Image: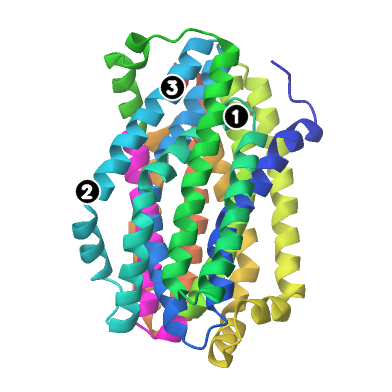
Amino acid sequence: MQKVANYRSIWSLSWPMLLSNISVPLLGLVDTAILGHLDDAHYLAAVAMGTSLLSFIYFSFNFLRMSTTGSVAQAVGKQDSGENFSIGFRGIIIAVAIGSAIIILQPFILHFSLSFMGDDKISLALAYEYASIRIYSAPAVLITFVIVGWFIGNKKTRVPLIMVLIANSLNIALDYLLIIHFEMNSEGAAYATLIAEYTAAIVGLLYFFRAYKTQRCGVSCSRIFSASEFKALLLINQPLFVRTLLLLTSYFFFTSQGANQSLDIVAANAILMSLILTISYAMDGFAHACEAYCGDALGQNNMVLFHRVIGLCFNLCLLTAVLFTVFFMVFKQPLINLFTSLDSIKELLLTYWIWLVLSPLISFMTYLMDGIFVAATATQSMRNTLAVSLFLVYFPTWWLTLSWGNHGLWFSFSAFTLCRFISLYVVFIKNNKNNRWSELTS
C-alpha cells in the first residue's frame, strides 16, 4: 500500500472521479439547457419533476455505491482479494434484484409520487411520460452504483471516468437528435438518458469481469452467497438506505414546494439545483478519494494515515469551493443565457442566484464528512445526523420562513446542508476522542 504523503497522491485519485462526477449531472444539464430554449416551459418543468422523482427512486439505493466503496477499501487494506471481488458480485446481484422490483412496481410508484408535485396537468402528464420511460433503466443505474463503488474502493478511478464519458457523449448526441431533430421534446430526453444509462452499466461490467479474469482469485459461489456476509452487508446498508431516503426527501420536498408556487419557479429552481448538483458531484471527487484511502488506512489500522488524508482532502475541497463561488459570481449572466431564453425565468434566476454563489462554501465540508464516514462504514451515524438535520432544522426553518417565498425555501435548504456538516463533525470529534474508528471497522 502506497502511503499518502502529499497532494499529488490525492489528486491522482481524485481528478478522474471529479471529471466523471461532474459529467453525471451534465446528463441533466444538457436536457435542461436544450429544453430551456424551447418556447414552452412545460417541457423543462416536466423534466425537472421527472428527474427529481427518478433521483428519489434511484438514489434511495445509492447505499449500494457507498457500502461497496467502504467495504472494498477495507478489504484492500487487509489484502483480501477474494472478499474484494465477492463484495462486487454480491452488490451486482442485489442491484439486479432491486432494479427488477422497481420496474414491476412502476405504475404504483409513479402515480403515487407525482400526486405530490403540484396540480399543473400538462406538466404532470409530461413528467409521467418522461419518468415511465426512464424508469426502465433502474437495473442499469443500480449496477452502475455498485461498479463505480467497487472501482473507487480499489483506487481505479479512471474506469468510472471512462464509463461516464462514453455514456454522456452518447446522451448529448441523442439529446440533439431526439429533442431538436425529431422534435420529441421531454420524451426524447428520456430515451436519450435511458440508452446512456444502459451503456454505462455495460461498459462497467466489462471492466469488472476483465479485472476478475486478470486477478484469478477464484471466488466460489458459496463465498459470494455466504449468509453471514449478506447479513453483514444488510447491517451496513440498512442505515444507508434510510439515510438516502431522508436525503432525497429533502430534494423531493424542495421541488414539490417550488411547484406549489409557480411553473416559472419550478423551472428556475431546476436550473439552479442542476448547478448545485454539479458542485456536489465535483466535491464528491475528493470525498471518494477520502473514502478509498481512509478505508484502506482503517483496514490497516493506520490512524496517522487516516488523519493525514482527511487534512489533504479538506484543503483541496476548500480550494475547489472557493473557485466554484468565484466562477458563479463572474459568469452569472453567460450561464443564465446558456440555460434559458425565457425572460421570466432569467429574471427569477437573477433574483435567486445568490444561493448558488453561497452553496459551495456552505456545503463542501458536508461532502468531506460523508466520505470519512463511508470509509469507516459508520452508517448509523450518517443516518442519525441526517434525520436530525431534516426534521429539526430543514422542515422547521422552511415553516418559519414561509413568508419569504422562494427565498425561504432556499434558506431552509442551505440551513439543512450546513447542519448535516455540523452534526457529523460532532460525531467525528467524539470518535477521535474515544478512539472508536477501529471499533467501527472491526
Residue 296 left/right relative to 56: right
Residue 122 left/right relative to 374: left
Rounded to the nearest angstrom, the CA distance separating label 2 from label 3 is: 26 Å
Residue 126, horizontal then vertical, whole percent: 35, 75
Residue of label 2: 104
Q: As shown in the figure, which amino acid type bears the numbered disc 2? A: Ile
Rounded to the nearest angstrom, the CA distance separating label 3 from label 1 is: 15 Å
The residue at 35%/29% (across/down) is: 93
Sequence-wise, the earlier of marks 3 and 1 is 3
Quadrant housing residue 266: bottom left
Q: Residue placed farthest to the front in the image?
A: 182
Residue of label 3: 87
Q: As shown in the figure, which amino acid type bears the numbered disc 1? A: Ala
Up/down of 236 relative to 134, above or below: above
Magenta stretch: dominant secondary structure: helix
Residue 191 left/right relative to 245: right
The residue at 57%/89% (across/down) is: 342
